[in-house]
Amino acid sequence: MTLTPVEPLPEHEVRVRAPGKVNLSLRVGARQEDGYHPLSTVFQAVSVYEEVVATPSDARTVTLSGVQAELVPTDASNLALRAVEVLARHTGIDDGVHLHLDKGVPVAGGMAGGSADAAAALVACDALWHTGLSRPELIELAAEVGSDVPFILMGHTAVGQGRGHLLTPALTRGEFHWAFAVQDRGLSTSAVYAAFDEVHGGSLGGPDPELDVPLMQALRAGDPRALGAALHNDLQVASLELDPLLAEPLTVATDAGALGVVVSGSGPTVAALGRSRQHALALAAAFTASGVADRVLTATGPVSGARVLAAD
């Protein structure tokens, strides 16, 4: 009797999409003795995405594609692999996994691209390994990986305190339209905080920064003009100290009628808020025409956090 060979079944995979973020407000307190700065920040998730595909493997490995993928480490320092290790340790799972990261969020751009990879990896491996963790449990694990990772899991708009990892959902109305001036040169978050300490005399301690009330009121009202006027970043001066050329996209966006313009997080991405989707496109065109950005993106916010797109 001759047996007909059976084609192997398609390899199981889980595909997850996770957004980048912009800090609408970032208030930074003096460095504490543990080296961290207490924050009061308002995050908004925006429609610039990372996609992560998780497939079974004998080991835990990562490959990358997309813009500037060559700048992202593929060793144990990769945030997505660190997230996998945290999840595996918590659940007692020994399985391997291969992660493929398709980069859409700027690398070292202040928009949490690495954190988006980590959040997506947590969601993907939770589904692949059938660990069945709740979203609050995943958010708790995310805080072990990095300060921005919990927000990328939550998405939408939220207030972050502590290191930015203690989250409270923010009441918002409507949709906001953004143009981003992206630089191929990155800025090290640790270097920006060190420059912030120099600007502020390197003092230790002091009160925690307070919540940005006018900005919260603008979000609740769904008022883009008031939101633009309230955009704020305590790290912006430090980012400009390290990268003075960032003054150029800030000026271009202001001259083009942006409702507000701010360095996103630790930079160097500059975020400009438009009156409408069409105005955001006009702001992007101004960035391009003036040559002050290596790449230009447009996006809307708020959007959902890390979510499974497909599981086969």
Image: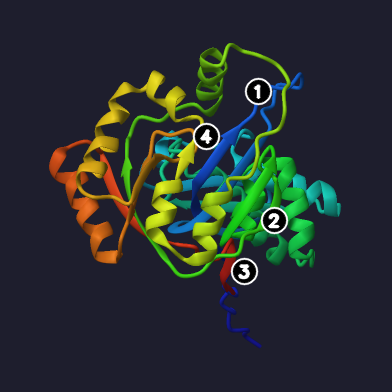
- Tell me which numbered mark, 1 or 4, is placed earlier along the sequence: 1
The disc at residue 30 is: 1
Label 1: how many Cα within 10 Å (few below 14, some 14–19, many 20+): many
Residue indicated by mark 3: 12
For this view, does 138 lie left or right of residue 279? right
Q: Which quadrant of the view contains residue 91?
A: bottom right
Q: Residue furthest left?
A: 289
For this view, does 35 lie left or right of residue 222? right
Residue indicated by mark 2: 168
Residue indicated by mark 4: 73
Q: For the point 59% across and 43% down, which residue is it?
A: 41
Q: How many angstroms separate mark 2 from mark 4 (CA)?
A: 32 Å
- Tell me which numbered mark, 3 or 2, is placed earlier along the sequence: 3
Q: Position of residue 286 (x, y in %)?
A: 18, 47
Label 2: how many Cα within 10 Å (few below 14, some 14–19, many 20+): some
- Tell me which numbered mark, 3 or 4, is placed earlier along the sequence: 3
Amino acid found under the numbered disc labelled 4: Pro
**Image quadrant containing the N terminus:** bottom right
Q: How many angstroms separate mark 3 from mark 4 (CA)?
A: 25 Å
